[in-house]
Amino acid sequence: MNEFNDFYFTLVSPEGESIEFSIRELLDYEFSHDIPIQSYTKQVKIEVMKDLISDIEKCISIIEKDENARLNEV
């Protein structure tokens, strides 16, 4: 796999529990746990990555919108 910057993300549950992980750890987990699938195809891996990217882009959009609203308040 290509090199990643191993930035860590924190996910906080509604109960206040937190989990820290890097993108590499997330992908390793996604494709290494035991589920009754013969093997992951390249297309399945691509779809998982696209979904992850889409989620990250949504988060960026929300942060940008919040930041722009904050800047316009001044």
Image (cartoon, rainbow, N blue to C red):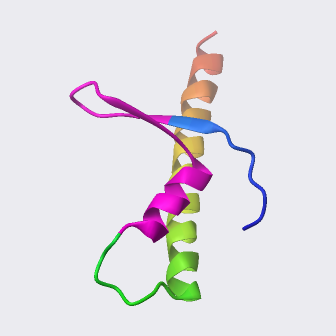
Q: Which residues are magenta?
A: 10-33
Residue occupying image coordinates x 63% and y 19%: 72
Q: Nearer the viewer, residue 59 or 7?
A: 7
Residue at point 64% right, 9% down? Answer: 74
The furthest residue to the right = 3
Q: Is residue 56 above or below residue 30?
A: above
The reply to whether the magenta stretch includes residue 46 is: no
Q: Residue 61 at what x, y percent from top left?
A: 58, 44
**As drawn, is 67 to the left or to the right of 18?**
right
Quadrant for residue 43, please give it.
bottom right
Q: Quadrant of residue 69?
A: top right
Position in image of residue 32 (x %, y %):
45, 68
Among the 4 quarters of the image, the one containing residue 49: bottom right
Q: Is residue 2 above or below residue 72?
A: below
Q: Residue furthest top?
A: 74
Q: Position of residue 64 (x, y in %)?
A: 62, 35
Q: Residue at x 45, y 87 (%)?
A: 39
7 displayed left or right of 55: right
Say which residue appears at 59% left-offset and 43% top-offset.
60
**Is residue 44 at all visible to an observer of this figure?**
yes
Taking the magenta stretch, the answer to whether it contains residue 19 is yes
- Is residue 65 placed above or below 25 in the rendered structure? above
Q: Is residue 70 above or below residue 22?
A: above
Does residue 57 show up?
A: no
Residue 17 locus on image (x, y percent): 29, 28
Q: Quadrant of the N terminus?
A: bottom right
Q: Nearer the viewer, residue 72 or 46?
A: 46
